[in-house]
């Protein structure tokens, strides 16, 4: 079934909207053998961007192998290393015999083995005979480069939700080993290996790559820009035309502004509108779709606000009321923020909870556009200007 608005998976080709500059930048960087980092809030299009860039490279006839690992449920070094190794080996090998040969050859002297029983029972390619040591970490993070060299291939290793590695006490050992691996990969002659780091916890990724600079000069950041509104309008109108329905352009514009160009939200919202009528999309349909959208997310939004302190909610309200100088005396008094030192603590807490972020000019924004709308209209009941 051809769905006009796809939101349940990443998109490429005609379903991919905007971000041509980012695709070109990513493709050029990978073509030059550079490592890349991409971060943005959940469902902001990171995976679609990566897959579209790879799609474009394949169309041009470029040959490469892709290894993809998602760390969303990984919180410890041992699990990361075995999953990482399994993903890398699977990307270049296809039989148990090849798995065993690769592990015994390229991971010799480590605690990693190919356990046929665990492979048969759990589909686990790489197993660990004991807790990994520093040598094991170095050997495993260097594995993609050695495989690329031996196979004479270009290998792109995608690590999604990369910031989760910081949940483990040994994350600095992993980061150090990854630095060494990236430096060694630059000297490969038989093949190339690049890492693509992706993460949805924006402030955590900023800390790793921008503030602490763990991978300084080794990784290039590809920032995700806002999608042009006209491209969103054309995409939505085309989707409704394919299903024999009509929507006014200004309704699409207001939707794009509400969701701040987030295509996952827009596609889900428009799919809901599509299901509510057989013909014309009017304002009543849009409002019913918005109520549906809010009802789906409201329990999550209520959990977020339920875990905030009074100072944190006060600062959130100040942000929604366009305050930027939070430490000024009048702002501290108006929003009962106590002191400038407390303001800093509250800002840090909201950033760690991934509710807000700050740009280079120290201007704040709420990361989730629908949460911002819900806060403004239903939680704080701020009147429209």
Image (tube, rainbow, N blue to C red):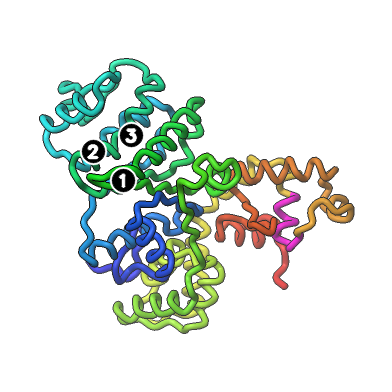
Q: Is residue 58 left or right of residue 262?
A: left
Label total for image: 3
Task: Report if residue 278 is visible in the image.
Answer: no
* Labels 3 and 2 touching (C-beta < 8 A): no
Indicate the quadrant where residue 106 lies: top left
Q: Quadrant of the C terminus?
A: bottom right
Return the residue nearer the eye: 222 or 50: 222
Q: Is residue 288 left or right of residue 10?
A: right
- The boundaries of the magenta stretch are 314-323
Which labelled disc corresponds to residue 147?
A: 2
- Image spot of residue 9 (x, y percent): 33, 56
Measure the C-alpha gap from mark 2 to mark 1: 9 Å
Residue drawn at the location 65% of the way across and 57% of the way down = 360
Q: Is residue 367 left or right of residue 48?
A: right
Dot 1: few (<14), some (14–19), or many (≥20) neighbours within 10 Å?
many
The residue under label 3 is 142
Measure the C-alpha gap from mark 3 to mark 2: 9 Å
The residue under label 1 is 193
Name the N-terminal-most of marks 2 and 1.
2
- Image spot of residue 185 (x, y percent): 34, 42
What element does badge 3 sit on? loop
- Image spot of residue 206 (x, y percent): 56, 47
Return the residue nearer the eye: 107 or 276: 107
Magenta stretch, main secondary structure, is helix
Residue 302 located within the stretch drawn in magenta? no
Name the N-terminal-most of marks 3 and 1.
3
Indicate the quadrant where residue 281 lies: bottom left
What element does badge 1 sit on? strand
Residue 319 located within the stretch drawn in magenta? yes
Task: Report if residue 341 is visible in the image.
Answer: yes
Residue drawn at the location 35% of the way across and 61% of the way down = 27
């Amino acid at each position: 079934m051809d769905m006009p608005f796809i939101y349940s998976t990443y998109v490429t080709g005609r379903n991919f909207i905007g971000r041509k500059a980012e695709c070109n930048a990513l493709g050029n960087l990978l073509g030059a053998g550079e490592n890349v980092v991409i971060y943005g809030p959940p469902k902001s299009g990171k995976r679609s961007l990566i897959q579209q860039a790879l799609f474009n490279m394949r169309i041009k006839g470029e040959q490469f192998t892709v290894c993809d690992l998602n760390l969303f449920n990984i919180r410890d070094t041992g699990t990361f290393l075995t999953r990482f190794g399994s993903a890398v080996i699977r990307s270049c090998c296809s039989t148990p015999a090849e798995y065993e040969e690769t592990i015994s050859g390229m991971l010799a002297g480590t605690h990693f083995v190919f356990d046929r029983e665990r492979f048969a029972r759990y589909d686990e390619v790489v197993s660990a005979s004991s807790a990994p040591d520093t040598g094991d970490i170095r050997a495993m993070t260097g594995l993609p480069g050695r495989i690329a060299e031996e196979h004479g291939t270009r290998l792109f290793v995608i690590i999604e939700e990369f910031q989760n590695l910081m949940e483990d006490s040994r994350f600095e050992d992993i980061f150090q080993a990854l630095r060494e691996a990236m430096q060694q990969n630059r000297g490969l002659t038989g093949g190339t290996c690049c890492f693509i780091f992706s993460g949805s916890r924006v402030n955590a990724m900023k800390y790793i790559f921008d503030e602490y600079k763990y991978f300084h000069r080794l990784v290039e950041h590809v920032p995700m820009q806002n999608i042009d509104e006209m491209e969103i309008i054309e995409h939505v109108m085309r989707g409704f035309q394919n299903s024999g329905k009509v929507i006014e352009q200004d309704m699409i514009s207001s939707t794009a502004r509400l969701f701040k160009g987030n295509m996952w939200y827009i596609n889900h919202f428009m799919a809901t509108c599509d299901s509510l009528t057989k013909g014309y999309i009017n304002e009543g349909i849009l409002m019913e779709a918005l109520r549906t959208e809010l009802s789906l997310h409201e329990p999550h939004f209520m959990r977020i606000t339920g875990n905030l302190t009074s100072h944190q909610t006060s600062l959130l309200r100040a942000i929604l009321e366009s305050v930027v100088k939070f430490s000024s005396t009048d702002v501290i008094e108006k929003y009962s923020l106590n002191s400038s030192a407390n303001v800093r603590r509250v800002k840090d807490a909201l950033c760690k909870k991934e509710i807000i972020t700050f740009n280079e000019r120290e201007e704040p924004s709420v990361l989730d556009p629908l949460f911002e709308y819900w806060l403004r209209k239903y939680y704080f009941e701020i009147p429209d200007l």
